[in-house]
Amino acid sequence: MRVKVAGLLALALLLSGCTGEDSGARDGRVTLRFQSLAWQQESVEANQDLVKEWNAAHPDVKVEYVQGSWDSVHDQLLTSFEGGEAPDIIHDASDDLADFAYGGYLADLTDLLPERLRSDIPQRSWDTATFGDGIYGVPFLQEPRVLIADSARLKEVGVRIPTPEHPWSWPEFRKITEQLSGDGRYGVAWPLKEPVSATLNLSLSAGGQLFHRGADGRVTVRFGAADAVVPRTIHDQAQTDGSASPTTLGSGGSDTLPGFFGGRYAMVPLGFSYRQQIAQQAPKGFAWQVLPAPAGADGLTQGVSPQTLSVAEDSPHKKEAAEFIDFLLRPENMVRLALGDWMLPTGTQALKDPALHTAKDGWDTGTALATHLRPAPAQSVRGYPEWKDKVATPAFQEYYSGSIDLAELRERLEKDGNLVLARYQR
């Protein structure tokens, strides 16, 4: 009899462990796991504080904060999806969502999100997380690329200071970096350890698209004249003019800061959030300023892949998860998240907050660029991660280092790249 009872108990435990509804809502209480990729101290604190505030106001729906990492999020999520252990609420970036959305791992949020949130975020931002007929993430933070400049160097040489209303063109930028070079110093340091997204996103300003979708829905790579403007500028600065440091091409953004503070580079193109590191690490008395990236035929347009919040398709509590996302992204909370990450909110109400329009630390320059941000070219391309890792990254690295010419770069991006993409479009 004791064996029979033990067997029934084991069966009951097994069944309850296999049922998300039971395990997530014991005693009528729902528990949601929220995996956040926040990593800067201010950002982590803002996220954790908001989770605490939600839990205090919603005793029947508890949110557990889970710390994730940008370095491993794609593989970690794929493993958790396939193992049935994905968090309910997923923090990621929009350019990482396509394969998960098409693979059925993410919930379609179209009918789960309130109108307040749907109308507050511009359609151009929703486009970054829309795949087919569904919305698979809520874009909430975005980061334009800007030029961080040594104010004293610019003043010393007497170059024209660009503004969002009157930016430098790409040819003008190249000439100015030449003026700022000499005596062992460079006009610019390009940190291109991850060259693909930086190149493609900035190329939108020149009209570059690279990925083209045909009438049959298939995507192919075509590297045209507009796509070559930014890569050629970077290549020529580093390999022809000597106005860009060749040694930083394989570096990350943070790696260039000591040389920037030491006067070796007059400017560094970086993501907007790097301002936090610069504000914290710059030597006393070092004056720096934020300038808009150069403009091309399409003005200041550049691509972005906003940070997103998604809900796992396997979550038994999609409605509650969407309600937490709505809370997290109320205008006042979105401002807190933006300030914590030193990025721009996507929400139109949050973007109006005076704290995001101050001249200090270049916030006003960043907010002026918000209306020029568009979905990154690779946003909805299936197979993009493999194309980027196996084809585009080594091709751009070799081109920027001078190992191959522009014709070879074009052939590899198109010929090898289209072979990769074709496998995902059968």
Image: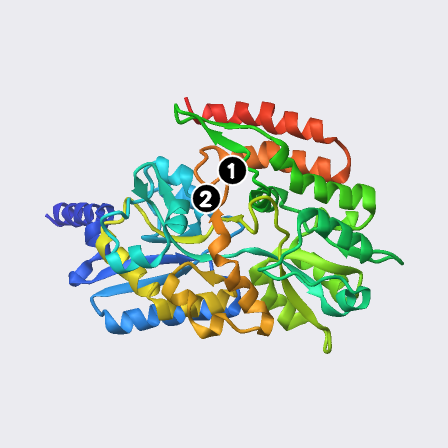
Q: Nearer the viewer, residue 372 or 114?
A: 372
Residue 377 % position (x, y): 50, 40
Please determine whether, in this image, residue 15 is positioned above or below residue 43: above
> What's under tag 1, amino acid-wise?
Pro
Rendered image: mark on residue 96: 2
Q: Residue furthest bottom?
A: 284
Residue 47 visible? The answer is no
Question: Is there a contact, CB below 8 Å, between mark 2 and mark 1?
Answer: yes
Q: Nearer the viewer, residue 84 or 370?
A: 370
Q: Residue 201 lies in what quarter of the image? A: top right
Rendered image: mark on residue 385: 1
> What's under tag 2, amino acid-wise?
Asp
At horizontal 42% and vertical 70% (from top left) the residue drawn is 336
Q: Residue furthest right?
A: 183
Mark 1 Cα shell of 10 Å, populated few (<14), some (14-19), many (≥20): some
Give the mark, 2 or 1, whose residue is nearer the N terminus.
2
* Distance from Cα at disc 2 to Cα at disc 1: 8 Å
Q: Residue 182 lies in what quarter of the image? A: bottom right
Q: Secondary structure at mark 1?
A: helix
